[in-house]
Image: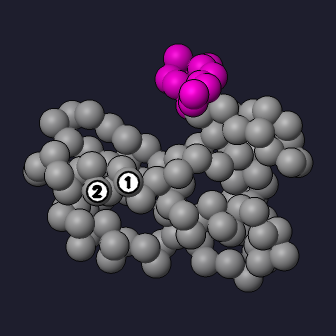
Amino acid sequence: MRQFVFQETGDEMPLINCPSHGYVGGELVTQAVSDLVRDRSRWSDSRRIVPLIFLRDEIEHPGYMLESEETKVLALGGKYEGGGVYRFNDDESMEAAIGLLTATCVECLRELMAVQKEG
């Protein structure tokens, strides 16, 4: 059974058991970002992580991906609308895009993004 915690905004987020931070909220990311988050030795020279929003009929699915993964999202039928927003015109393509996302520790992700910002 998947467990969820609520953010200050009232949105649900998955609950993750992180080896570094214990039980914390999770953030939806692509598998490539998840792999990077778990391998701290690659943080300093890693590709840039960018926020994204998958949008279909005004339903939003936020997450993060590597900047280089945009071609995957476009290949699935997402139309880039600016500001990290990718609009989908049918349920199948939207579900395929959501299938790219997995949960990772929100605290580790923040730390990684801070390292990228400093570098």
Task: Please say whether residue 110 is visible from this viewpoint.
Answer: no
Q: Locate residue 20 relative to residue 31 in the image: left or right.
A: right
Q: Looking at the rendering, in which quadrant would you find the C terminus?
A: bottom right
Kind of residue at badge 2: Ala
Give the camera-side residue of 82 and 42.
42
- Residue 3 magenta-highlighted: yes
Is the residue 72 above or below the residue 90 in the image? below
Q: Residue furthest left?
A: 89
Question: Which quadrant of the figure has residue 86?
Answer: bottom left
Q: Locate residue 51 relative to residue 25 in the image: left or right.
A: left
Kind of residue at badge 1: Gly
Task: Please say whether residue 67 is visible from this viewpoint.
Answer: yes
Which residue is at 41% across, 59% downward? 100
The x and y percentages for residue 92 are 17, 52
Instruction: Tell me the magenta residue range.
Output: 1-13
The x and y percentages for residue 62 are 43, 44
Is the residue 90 above or below the residue 116 in the image? above
Q: Locate residue 78 relative to residue 114 in the image: left or right.
A: left
Question: Taken as a whole, is the magenta stretch helix, strand or loop?
Answer: loop
Which residue is at 71% across, 62% downward? 37
What residue would you read off at disc 2? 96
What residue would you read off at disc 1? 99
Judging from the image, what secondary structure is the residue with disc 2 in?
helix
Q: Which mark is residue 115?
A: none
Which residue is at 22% across, 61% downward? 78
The x and y percentages for residue 67 are 48, 72
Give the camera-side residue of 102 and 61.
102
The x and y percentages for residue 98 are 36, 50
Instruction: Report the number of numbered marks.
Output: 2
Give the camera-side residue of 80 and 14.
14
- Other residues around mark 1 within 10 Å, as few (<14) / some (14–19) / many (≥20): few
CA distance for labels 1 and 2: 5 Å
